[in-house]
């Protein structure tokens, strides 16, 4: 049985093809904190933050609009 690919999976596959994530992540991981310096919640993974940032720029979304898009 073949699983049908969801819209989200198609979009993420296209995003992966457009942006060289392994190269970009290797550049930013040196500056990304591993733990919260003041003992708060742990930071989100750098790959997730990079994808969110790129989506905000590609679709001209403010932080609030991006938050609603992520919830959907």
Image (cartoon, grey):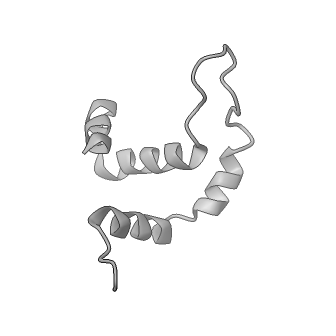
- Taking the spot 69% from the left edge, 18% from the top edge, the residue there is 37
User: Picture coordinates of residue 4 (x, y %)?
Assistant: 29, 77
Q: Quadrant of residue 39?
A: top right
Q: Is residue 47 above or below residue 8?
A: above
Quarter of the image for the C terminus: give it: top left
Q: Is residue 42 left or right of residue 59?
A: right
Quarter of the image for the N terminus: give it: bottom left
- How many numbered tags mark residues here? 0
Q: Is residue 12 left or right of residue 70?
A: right
Toward the top, the furthest residue is: 38
User: Picture coordinates of residue 34 (x, y %)?
Assistant: 71, 33
Q: Is residue 35 left or right of residue 41?
A: right
Q: Is residue 33 above or below residue 8?
A: above
Toward the front, the furthest residue is: 1
- Taking the spot 56% from the left edge, 50% from the top edge, the residue there is 47
Toward the right, the furthest residue is: 30
- Taking the spot 67% from the left edge, 13% from the top edge, the residue there is 38
Q: Quadrant of residue 60?
A: top left
Q: Nearer the viewer, residue 59 or 22?
A: 22
User: Picture coordinates of residue 71 (x, y %)?
Assistant: 29, 40
- Taking the spot 69% from the left edge, 28% from the top edge, the residue there is 35
């Amino acid at each position: 049985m073949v699983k049908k690919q969801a819209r989200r999976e198609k979009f993420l596959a296209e995003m992966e093809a457009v942006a060289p994530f392994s190269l970009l992540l290797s550049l930013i991981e040196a500056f990304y904190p591993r733990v919260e310096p003041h003992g708060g919640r742990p930071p989100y993974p750098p790959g997730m933050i990079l994808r969110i940032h790129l989506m905000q720029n590609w679709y001209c979304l403010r932080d609030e609009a991006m938050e609603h898009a992520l919830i959907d």
